[in-house]
Amino acid sequence: MEPSNNKNKMPYVVSSKSPTAVAINAAAKTGEWIKSRLGAFKELGTKLSPQDLVTDVDKGAEIMIRKLIQTHFPEHDFLGEEGVEPGPEASSKAVQELEDSEYLWIVDPIDGTTNFVHGFPYFCVSIALAHKGEIIVGVIYDPMRDEMFVAEKGKGAYVHGNLMSVSKETELAGSLMAIGFNPEREFALPNNMKGITALSTRTRSLRAAGAAAMHLAYVAAGRVTGYYEVGLNVWDIAAGVLLVTESGGKVTDTKGNPYSLSTRHLAATNGLIHDELLGVLDEAGATGL
Ligand code: IPD
Ligand code: CA
Ligand code: CA
């Protein structure tokens, strides 16, 4: 029998909930708190570059999510943006170390921090669970619109309980494409600018709202036809990738290779315009690969 003082040090474990329910609960609670701090954050710092922002709210939100998850699944691994050194090398190394984990939670506490800092109401919490490198749960919560996007591997993707499906455009010419102005300005931004220039005359229009995870949720919901960006991190996209594929869309790297947790240059579409998009990016030298 264990001495009672050791017993007191054991984490409190509640084991009856499904991972999806835990992710939804963590995203909802944390999202509400983030919303309550809009316009009221206390510290503003920069990471890799002056454009790469972080606040006390990003850090606090990640701690909240980690605690909520570990209450139920203390044996699972956890990869959150604020626990990794800034920059692509550190993030790739963290993925390499953890991608074979039996269960790995991948968390972006606030995707769209620049928007959060400016009070532009487009940011979200992104939580994914991977089993041996395969994403099995993806949850994205937009606290400003109170929209909860949820996907489970093989079970479809839902927004507030309604089944989602990708849009039906068959050509880039009729497509609304999401893109990103990546904060890393040496490699990622120039590649993205080549893609943006090429796509600007080939699509119906482009949108860059500043939150990769939410762009992917919008691809899944059929609100944009696709999304492309060079220079993303696993926490930006893991949950959104499952939302898109479970909504009938297609996700690859920018050269058309299958998505894996180490993919950083991403193309996610309704599937119908995927090859045309990859062709335009290739022609423009905008794949980053
Ligand atoms: C950023 C946003 C942005 C994308 C960047 C990401 P953060 O994430 O998703 O839209 O262009 O590549 O780093 O820093 O707001 O979590
Ligand atoms: Ca992010
Ligand atoms: Ca973030």
Image (tube, helix red, strand yellow):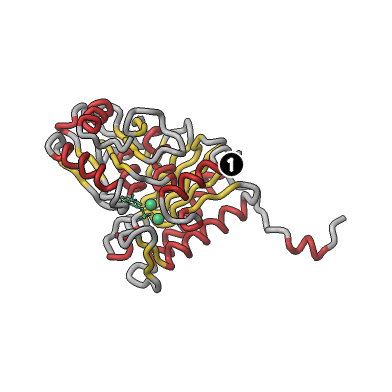
Residue pushed farthest front? 186
57 vs 209, left or right, is: right
| Position in image of residue 287 (x %, y %) | 29, 35
Residue of label 1: 103
Quadrant of the rendering where the C terminus is positioned: top left
Please name the residue shown 36% across and 47% down the image. Answer: 213
**Above or below — where is 276 with respect to 146?**
above
Q: Amino acid at mark 1?
A: Tyr
| Position in image of residue 152 (x %, y %) | 48, 37
Please name the residue shown 24% across and 46% down the image. Answer: 190
Q: Secondary structure at mark 1?
A: strand
Please name the residue shown 51% across and 57% down the image. Answer: 83
Mark 1 sits near ligand 2, with its Cβ under 8 Å away: no
| Position in image of residue 252 (x %, y %) | 36, 32
| Position in image of residue 79 (x %, y %) | 52, 50
Judge by depth and name the residue closer to the eye, 27 or 164: 27
